[in-house]
């Protein structure tokens, strides 16, 4: 007997699914959310940053990612971020909207993203002190079932989650097409991908450029980037080198961006967003302001960021 789920599974083999998969097998840009002097979202600067990314050749944009300060934005600001990104992307880039919080909020955000014109949603790791394996599957299934027309990408940050849990989710939800894996352990990633189904999902190195080469060896075909807000040419150069198997060239780019990414990762990533915004402020593209619990960089680190950016193709 043919069920609705069976028909939906068959439908997911069409061109739309392949376009969604290609979109996340790439540089997945996480745009910042610029703020004005009064603390509100600076939409003109937001559009400038987005337009600059698309003009540089970036074809995948994720509004409401962590570099976009997802957890510091209001629901209205998160919805508007998706709408603005879709408008600036036009037909030149695919939008992967970040969603999260409790199930009703995540589902409502996913439905809004679909209505606004996003093609996929990235589901943030559930922020809850008691996450059980089956509950993790249930959480993501609720989102995926609410938007069967969208590709769904879970954001995995928990090293305790087994690959089999993702495999179960993929069996239940054919529109779960990719995984943003952000556990800083290349061996764990390779094992997780194979336990879940290496070919079933598109694997994204969710810890950006520094982890992209090692995760590529384990099966990743895309990586997220916050650095791309500042120097998209470097992120694209790393992608091209990895795709073409030019590993020496890839590591040359890796060395070039390493000091910047290490500044972002210091102190358990306390200045992850602040470093990117400082670079954008140095370039005159956005203010350096961030929202608590983040904080702007101290003067010595501002100087270090300016020195790094001065030698980049920006």
Image (cartoon, rainbow, N blue to C red):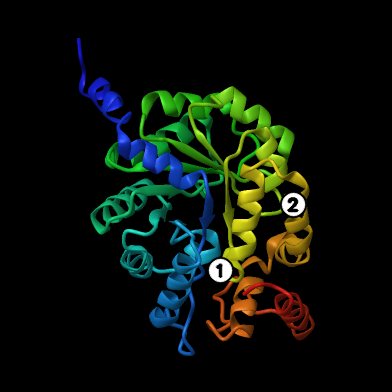
Circle 1: is it few (<14), some (14-19), or many (20+) Cα within 10 Å?
many
Vertical side of 277 occupied by 255: above or below:
above
Quadrant for the C terminus in the image: bottom right
Quadrant of residue 283 in the image?
bottom right
Quadrant for the N terminus in the image: top left
Disc 1: which residue: 229
Measured from the top left, where is residue 265 in percent x and y? 72, 61
Instruction: Tell me how far mark 2 sits from mark 1, CA to CA.
Output: 22 Å
Q: Along the horizontal axis of the image, is 147 left or right of 242? A: left
In this view, the residue in front, 215 or 98, is 215
Q: Are marks 2 and 1 in contact (CB under 8 Å)?
A: no
Measured from the top left, where is residue 34 in percent x and y? 49, 77
Q: Along the horizontal axis of the image, is 285 left or right of 257? A: left
User: Could you tell me if residue 207 is visible in this image?
Assistant: no
Taking the view exactly as shown, the residue that stands out farthest to the top is 1
User: Could you tell me if residue 72 is visible in this image?
Assistant: yes
Q: Give the tally of numbered discs.
A: 2
Mark 2 or mark 1: whose residue is earlier in sequence: 1
**Residue, x 26% and y 59% (percent of image)?**
116
Query: From the viewer's perspective, is the residue at label 2 or at label 1 nearer?
Result: 2
Disc 2: which residue: 249
Label 2, secondary structure: give it. Answer: helix
Taking the view exactly as shown, the residue that stands out farthest to the bottom is 37
Say the numbered circle drawn on residue 129.
Answer: none
């Amino acid at each position: 007997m043919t069920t609705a789920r069976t028909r939906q599974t068959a439908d997911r083999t069409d061109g739309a699914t392949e376009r969604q998969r290609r979109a996340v097998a790439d540089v997945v840009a996480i745009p910042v959310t610029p703020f004005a002097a009064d603390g509100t979202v600076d939409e003109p600067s937001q559009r400038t940053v987005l337009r600059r990314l698309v003009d540089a050749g970036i074809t995948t944009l994720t509004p409401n990612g962590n570099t976009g300060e997802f957890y510091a934005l209001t629901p209205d600001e998160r919805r508007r971020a998706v709408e603005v990104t879709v408008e600036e992307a036009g037909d030149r880039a695919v939008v992967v909207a970040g969603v999260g919080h409790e199930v009703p909020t995540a589902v409502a955000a996913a439905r809004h993203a679909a209505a606004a014109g996003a093609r996929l949603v990235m589901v943030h790791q559930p922020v809850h002190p008691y996450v059980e394996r089956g509950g993790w599957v249930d959480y993501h299934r609720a989102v995926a079932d609410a938007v069967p027309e969208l590709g769904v990408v879970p954001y995995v940050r928990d090293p305790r989650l087994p690959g089999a849990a993702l495999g179960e989710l993929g069996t239940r939800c054919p529109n779960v097409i990719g995984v943003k894996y952000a556990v800083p352990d290349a061996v764990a990633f390779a094992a997780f991908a194979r336990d879940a189904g290496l070919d079933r999902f598109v694997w994204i190195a969710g810890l950006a450029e520094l982890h992209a080469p090692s995760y590529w060896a384990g099966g990743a075909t895309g990586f997220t980037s916050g650095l791309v807000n500042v120097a998209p040419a470097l992120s694209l150069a790393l992608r091209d080198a990895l795709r073409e198997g030019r590993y020496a060239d890839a590591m040359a780019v890796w060395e070039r961006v390493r000091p910047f990414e290490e500044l972002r990762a210091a102190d358990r990533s306390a200045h992850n967003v602040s470093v990117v915004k400082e670079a954008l402020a140095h370039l005159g593209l956005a203010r350096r302001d961030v929202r608590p619990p983040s904080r702007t960089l101290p003067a010595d680190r501002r100087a270090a960021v300016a020195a790094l950016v001065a030698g980049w193709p920006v």
